[in-house]
Image: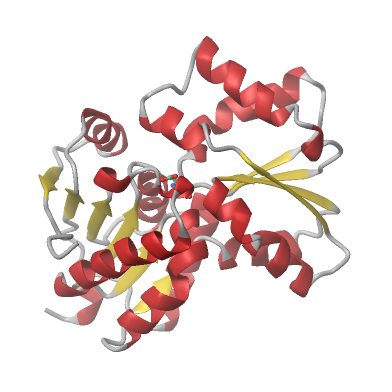
Amino acid sequence: MNKPQKSIGIFDSGIGGLTVANAILNILPKESIVYFGDTAHLPYGDKSPEIIKKFCRAITSFLLQQEVKMIVIACNSASAAAFELVRKLAEEQQVTVINVIDPVVDYIVSNKFNHVGIIGTRATIGSKIFPTKIKIANPAIEVSALATPLLAPMIESGFVKGDISRTVIETYLADETLNDIDALVLACTHYPLIKREIEEYYKNNHKNVNIIATNEIVAQAVLSTLESQNLINKVGNAQYHFFVSDYTDSFKKTTQLFYDQEVSLKQIDIFKEE
Ligand code: DGL
């Protein structure tokens, strides 16, 4: 098979990366996808960088065995902990790796925000990767980061609308850390699924805050990287293969939400040597 016709490998701890996969397919509908959701080890956000790296190593080997042409780490926690590791492993097979942090940092810096709020998992916020990278690019941008550890498990369990999720979302957004921001980065790939609820909170509180859902920004980075490497699939016949380390109903339901066709979803144990 010619390299452009190979699949894009995408992974996350669970359903969050599907928001990225979906954004990629919206602008690159002819691409095939191999997706791995590490549902057995979710949430990544509460794990140490060492253990996240261990999971990412196994997932990267799996995706490289599937002969993907590119790997997208569709998880902020994994991007923060393991990007260098994944990049090195993939480099041996001339496979480019895109993370979900660098394209977003570029976007923030080029849009000249004054005070940016970041919400994400403990792993992402604890790594300080967003403030560090933004400050290197433009020290004048004020950055306030808040860990919001309940959000990803809440979303993964299907609590997106309703009183429970509204209370959790409002409690986090009302935190004084996020006072006076002009942009809020949803630094977890699960959060686009509650973007509407977040927008509603700011609207109801008469605050003008740009909500930056990173999936579309990352999809643009995938498009321009594939273009620059002449790897866009022009032939089509897109195929979607979804793998999970533990079969969950919420994963099945969410894949169905995103793809109007029946998708192949398989449980697979790629961590046998653990
Ligand atoms: N979607 C993952 C991220 O972007 C986090 C979810 C988790 O904690 O597993 O950070």
Which quadrant of the view contains residue 183? top right
Q: Position of residue 200 (x, y in %)?
A: 66, 22
Which quadrant of the view contains residue 24? bottom left
- Residue 99 in view in this figure: no
At 47% from the left edge and 47% from the top edge, which residue is drawn? 45
- Residue 195 in view in this figure: yes
Q: Position of residue 22 (x, y in %)?
A: 37, 47
Q: In the drawing, does residue 70 fall left or right of residue 116?
A: left
Taking depth in this image into account, of 242 and 172 the one nearest to the observer is: 172
Which quadrant of the view contains residue 159? top left
The C terminus is located in which quarter?
Answer: bottom left
At 27% from the left edge and 50% from the top edge, which residue is drawn? 38
Q: In the drawing, does residue 62 fall left or right of residue 216?
A: left
The N terminus is located in which quarter?
Answer: bottom left
- Applied colour scheme: secondary structure
At 57% from the left edge and 28% from the top edge, which residue is drawn? 196
Check the image and report above or below for 75 versus 106: above
How many badges with numbers are in the image?
0
Check the image and report above or below for 188 versus 255: below
Taking depth in this image into account, of 14 and 231 the one nearest to the observer is: 14
Q: Position of residue 80 (x, y in %)?
A: 52, 63
Q: Position of residue 174 (x, y in %)?
A: 75, 26
